[in-house]
Amino acid sequence: MPGIKCGGCSRFASPVDGARCGKCRVLYCRVCGGFPAKASVPPTWRCPECKKNIARDNRNDTPVRGPTQSPPSDVAGISVMESSTPSRDVTSLNAATTTRESSPVPSSDLHAILHELRAVRAEIQVFRREMEVEMSELKTALSCCSARVDGLEARVDALELRIINVAVCEQCKNDCPREGKMMCGLNEKDRKYILFPSECAVKSYSVCHNVELTMTPIKYCINHEKKKSRRMYGESCPLFCPSHYRPVCGMSSMRSYIYKAFNNACFFDMLACRGDDMNQYIEVPLEFCQRHLMKNIFREKVVISGLNDYRDYHEY
């Protein structure tokens, strides 16, 4: 049997193996018709040229051209039915959900909820006002208590001071004569010099304040005061010192019972005049550095010059 030209690809196809349109009766091969090799062609099948002229939405100006390889109508119908079934289910589910969500709350329940919320809000406001009043009263009471405690502390301090003064007056009666030989005492614990008008005043002070004083020559008290005034008036410090050896003992002003020996008074004055409180030393008699004298001698370089009559500038 001679072949007939396909209406899609223009190739010759057998009428038995081809698919004929049920409307225009044009023959198409199975490839252009979109049929498998052993599938049957329904008599109501339409070719792509006929399908493109089918109007949708009742409008003639919106034709839809089908695919070149369109599936059979039965298969298409089945697939359309299968694909439309889930969409219908989803649509019905959405509609039910929307209906549930848009269903209004009964007016009686809504009014009851609003009434309860207003009542709770009113209770909170009342509680807040009460707390503000109570806090103000508490602050006032605390301020009054603080003032009373401050007054009691002041009275206790005054009584203690009065008792101490009475005890000091009874224990520290100064019956020493006003005229006598002035003496200089060193308080090693507090690291300070005290100048007394007489030996009796030294003993009375030692007994009254329960301290041990070491008697030193009066020049140490005078030199100590001179160094304070010297720093006050801004006098210059020595920049270099002679190399002769005349040891001077110094006591640390930061820690008690710490002593250091210097080659001569100039080196001691150079360090003391800097104003560095961490390295500040107070001059004390050489007897305090007996244990440290040899150690400091061998630590520093000692050079003895031939100036036998040389005396340091601040000594007498």
Image (cartoon, rainbow, N blue to C red):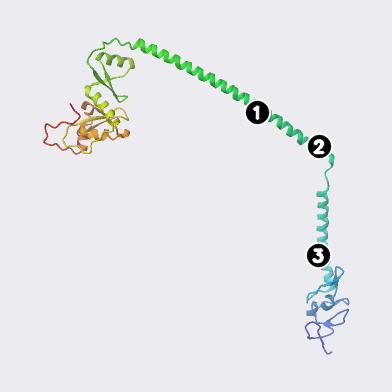
Q: Nearer the viewer, residue 37 or 248?
A: 248
Label 1, on which residue? 132
What amino acid type should be assigned to the residue bearing mark 3? Ser
Residue 26 in the image, given as x and y percentages of width and height:
85, 82
Front position in the image: 292 or 243: 243
Among the 4 quarters of the image, the one containing residue 230 = top left
Question: Which quadrant, please, contains the N terminus?
Answer: bottom right
Q: Secondary structure at mark 3?
A: helix
Q: Residues under labels 2 and 1: Cα distance?
A: 31 Å
The residue sitting at the bottom extreme is 2
170 versus 99 height, above or below: above
Q: Give the number of the mark in front: 2 or 1.
A: 1
Callout 2–callout 3 Cβ contact below 8 Å: no
Label 2 residue SS: helix
Q: Which residue is mark 2?
A: 112
List x then y, in percent, for residue 102. Answer: 82, 49
- Counting residues from the N terminus, which is met first, the one under dot 2 or under dot 3? 3
Q: Secondary structure at mark 1?
A: helix
Which residue ends up furthest to the front in the rendered image?
Answer: 233
Circle 3 is placed at which residue position?
Answer: 83
Residue 12 found in image quarter: bottom right
Q: Residue at x 43, y 15 (%)?
A: 160
Please name the residue shown 42% across and 12% down the image. 163
The spot of residue 297 in percent (x, y) is 20, 35
Q: How many residues crowd mark 3 within 10 Å: few (<14), some (14–19), many (20+)?
A: few
| Residue type highlighted by circle 1 | Glu
Q: Local crowd at mark 1 within 10 Å, few (<14), some, or many (≥20)?
A: few
The answer to whether 13 appears left or right of 293 in the picture is right
Task: Identify residue type, mark 2.
Answer: Ala
Q: CA distance from mark 2 to mark 3?
A: 48 Å
